[in-house]
Image (cartoon, rainbow, N blue to C red):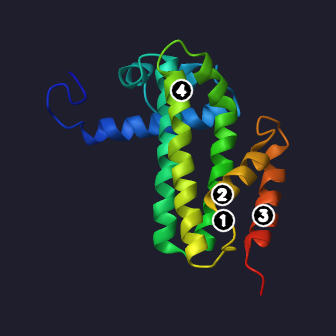
Amino acid sequence: MSVGNETGRKPRADSLRNREQLLESAKTAFTEIGADVPLEEVARRAGVGIGTLYRHFPTRDALLAAVYRREVEQLSASADALLATRPPGQALEAWLHLLIDYMATKRVIAPALRASPGDGPRVYASSGAAITEAMNRLARAAIASRDIRPDLGPDDLYRIMVGVSHGYDQPDWEPSARRLIEILMAGLRPPP
């Protein structure tokens, strides 16, 4: 039985749930074990059989690309969700911590994507624009609300984050990056 839209039907709820479980389990397994984790382990963690994994993701590269694409989509969408529920400065700070989480996953997945013979390099290359746009929306809102200094621009924040991201592939990077976010936010607040 076919799952998907090629027959014009919407995917079944259990199929969508299995796909999400596989993506979440793959993200965790890739982060904990590495991009070469046995796919049987991913299926086991998701609570599905290996056949279910292969129906959704016929290759490791397809699974890597789907996990990465999902991470980028979630990070981008979180900007609007945070702006809807918090003051812009707090939304920006929360989003920067989510960016750190994303980079921790990217550390494992990105090299495999770039080396992938399939869709991976294109998926990886196209992610930067969505992330930059989300950060720019947050920065513009925080500047407009005067939660951060008005003499800064989104490009300034981008340049700062390039510096914070330096060494993201090192094991001790994440705690340092989180400290730098705290220092950054203190420095971005307007003077009294």
**Disc 2 designates what residue?**
96
- Reading the chain from its start, which is encountered first: label 4 or label 1? 4
Residue 89 as seen in the image, left or right of residue 130: right
Residue 174 as seen in the image, left or right of residue 149: right
Q: Are marks 3 and 1 in contact (CB under 8 Å)?
A: no
Q: Amino acid at mark 3?
A: Leu
Residue depicted at 64% across the width and 77% down the height? 147
Please identify the residue farthest to the front as the structure is shown.
Answer: 151
Mark 3: give few (<14), some (14-19) or many (20+) Cα within 10 Å.
some
Q: Secondary structure at mark 4?
A: helix
Q: CA distance from mark 3 to mark 4?
A: 32 Å
Please identify the residue farthest to the top as the structure is shown.
Answer: 117
Q: Amino acid at mark 4?
A: Leu
Q: Is residue 183 above or below residue 31?
A: below
Q: Residue 54 in the image: x percent, y percent?
A: 41, 19
Q: Which image quarter: residue 113?
A: top right
Q: Residue 152 in the image: x percent, y percent?
A: 68, 66
Residue depicted at 45% across the width and 71% down the height? 84
**Disc 4 designates what residue?**
64
Mark in front: 3 vs 4: 3
Asked whether 99 or 26 is in front, the reply is 99
Q: CA distance from mark 2 to mark 1?
A: 5 Å
Q: Amino acid at mark 2?
A: Leu
Q: Are marks 2 and 1 in contact (CB under 8 Å)?
A: yes
